[in-house]
Image (tube, rainbow, N blue to C red):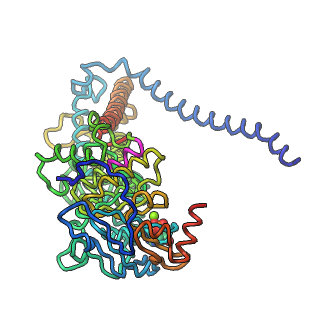
Amino acid sequence: MIRLDTTGPTPAEPPLEGATAVPHSHSPDSDATVPYVALDRVGLSYDGTEVFRGVSLPLYRGAVTALVGPSGSGKSSLLTCINRLYELHPGARMSGTITVGGEDIHGAGADPVRLRRRVGMIFQKPNPFPMSIRRNLSLPLSEHRLPRAEWSARIEEALTAAALWDEVKDRLDHPAQALSGGQQQRLCIARALILEPEVLLLDEPCSALDPLATEAIEQLVMGLKCCYTMLMVTHNLAQARRVADQVGVLWGQGQPGELVEFGPTAQLFDDPQHPVTVAFMQRERA
Amino acid sequence: MANLLAAQGGRPLRDGLADLATWLGVTLVAGSALWVVADVIWHGVGAVNWGFVTTAPQDAGRAGGISTILVATFLVLLVCMTAALPLGLGAAMYLSEYGRGPMGRWVRRSLDVLAGVPSIVFGLFGAVFFVQVLGLGFSILAGGLTLACMVLPILIRTTEMAFSGLPQEYRAGAAALGFGPSGILLRVLLPAAAPGLVAGLILGVGRALAETAVLIFTSGYVDRMPDSLLDSGRVLSLHIFDLSMNVPGGDHNAYGAAVVLLLILLVINGIGGWLSRRWIGRGIVAS
Ligand SMILES: Nc1ncnc2c1ncn2[C@@H]1O[C@H](COP(=O)(O)OP(=O)(O)O)[C@@H](O)[C@H]1O
Ligand SMILES: [Mg+2]
């Protein structure tokens, strides 16, 4: 079953008080004080060039963590560490450790295929395959050998969870690329959800979308908050403030990026500690 | 300021000349193609009827039809494509996925050399290798296989282009969904590249259908009905060549056979277009 908040999209959480970055969770089965995904002094280099280093970041189930920072600071690269997608680049090397659900992603017996089923990813530019809507969703199911009898139910479920079902239910066999940008991005979210992941990585999911489509995605992300551990890169500080429970600032100008500040959203926006964060907030506001 | 005005003053003339040159080029190309087609149809359409395509040639092709020729052509094409398609597809996938290193560069260079080799050289190669060394004799099998060697380079390069033209996002997207390398290639990239593959296939078939030199030395010249793939057979383009060059009084039927060849090419193009559209219609491939 795709876990979904039955109450539908919830309004943004009231800003959290206090210095701890522990959000409260809607799901009773999770221990909200233990991060579901933990990055410990993670660094990445491409062909020997360090992109970022020393990033330690706890991600909690039932919370959205926003990652902000100037472009080129390594935000996208950081996401690809968590699902080991960086391994597609032969020259990329990761240092440090990442655990997902307590398991080291590079530990003995860990494999990228199983990891990527647990950790879904949404890209900056919607990237549906050039096939029908239905096939976009059934392809991952068939790749992972899920019983064909379940396909249509799962497809409907995933599209419903991505708030797309009503718009496309009568044209499932139409090309996915005929959809609008916002619909394509929601299809990509459905495609990630259909494998029932536990973690969602969102890489500036709205940067190619108009304001209305952006709002739809934000609503969707907040609705999914209950049941997933989410890390969202965003350029849009207002969006981070609306959607995220905790925010990290990755900074690196001409040198390897570092996580200069990390904390609950309200604290970071109202009382930024690091001078770099202060400057960044001011510049983005201007 | 003066320069600017001069440039603007000069522009209409230069634009006009460029327009004229473009227009002339297009007209020349389209015109000569049309002329050839019109000439063939004008002279040949009278020879073509149901009897022409269903009866065997008589009197060295002056009389009778082209049924045996069509069968031989179809069989040669079948052998050629059966051999070339899997090889070509495999090689193209290899090149687009792993072909960035020195090995890939080496393979590509060899392919480009091969693509430029005159077909008569392929014919001689086939006559030695397939006909004699492998002992296939003058046969449809030997002809089809030699033809496969000849169309492979174009097939591989067009197919590779279809693959490498696909956006990187498909690969990353599929990998992020836990697809393994073969899953990415076969389930995502292959269907996505299908329209390009069809284009490559049509080019290859067209090239194969037009070929004469390769087949003179390999599948032979005999115009009777082939009884197996190891029998000799004469293909359509060779038949046309023979009728117009070696058989006095064969022109009429040569034109008739040419019309049939044109029709076959048209049908193959049509099928290719239909296939792509069908894929689009089923939503397997976007336009
Ligand atoms: N595959 C790669 N190979 C080499 N360098 C890369 C690769 N991907 C990203 N980079 C470099 O890493 C740095 C960080 O990129 P990226 O993670 O995309 O930053 P962001 O998402 O914050 O804009 C950039 O300088 C970029 O040029
Ligand atoms: Mg980025």
Q: Residue at (32%, 21%) from the top-left corner?
A: B48
Q: Position of residue B268 (x, y in %)?
A: 32, 35
Q: Which residue is outermost to the right? A: B2
Taking A222 as reference, is A75 above or below it?
below
In the image, residue B136 above or below residue A63: above
Residue B207 in the image, given as x and y percentages of width and height: 37, 43
Q: How many marks?
A: 0
Q: Quadrant of residue B37?
A: top left
Looking at the figure, which quarter contains the C terminus of chain A? bottom right
The residue closer to the viewer here, A54 or B120, is: A54
Q: Is B46 placed left or right of A119 in the picture? A: right
Q: At 35% across and 41% down in the image, what residue appears?
A: B286
Q: Specify whether residue B180 is in view.
A: no
Ligand 2: which quarter? bottom left
Q: Is residue B178 visible?
A: yes
Say which of A81 and B93 sits in front.
Answer: A81
> Where on the picture, by quarter, is residue A22?
bottom left
Relative depth, front residue between A123 and B93: A123
Q: Residue furthest front?
A: A17
The prevailing secondary structure element of the residues shown in magenta is helix
- Residue B177 is left or right of residue A127, and the answer is left
Classify residue B270 by image quadrant: top left
Give the residue displayed 37% in from the left and 20% down from the top: B45
The span shown in magenta is: A180-187
| Residue B38 among those drawn in magenta | no
Tell me if B23 is positioned left or right of B209 in this view.
right
Q: Position of residue A237 (x, y in %)?
A: 49, 61
At which x and y percent is residue B200? 36, 46
Frontmost residue, B83 versus A247: A247
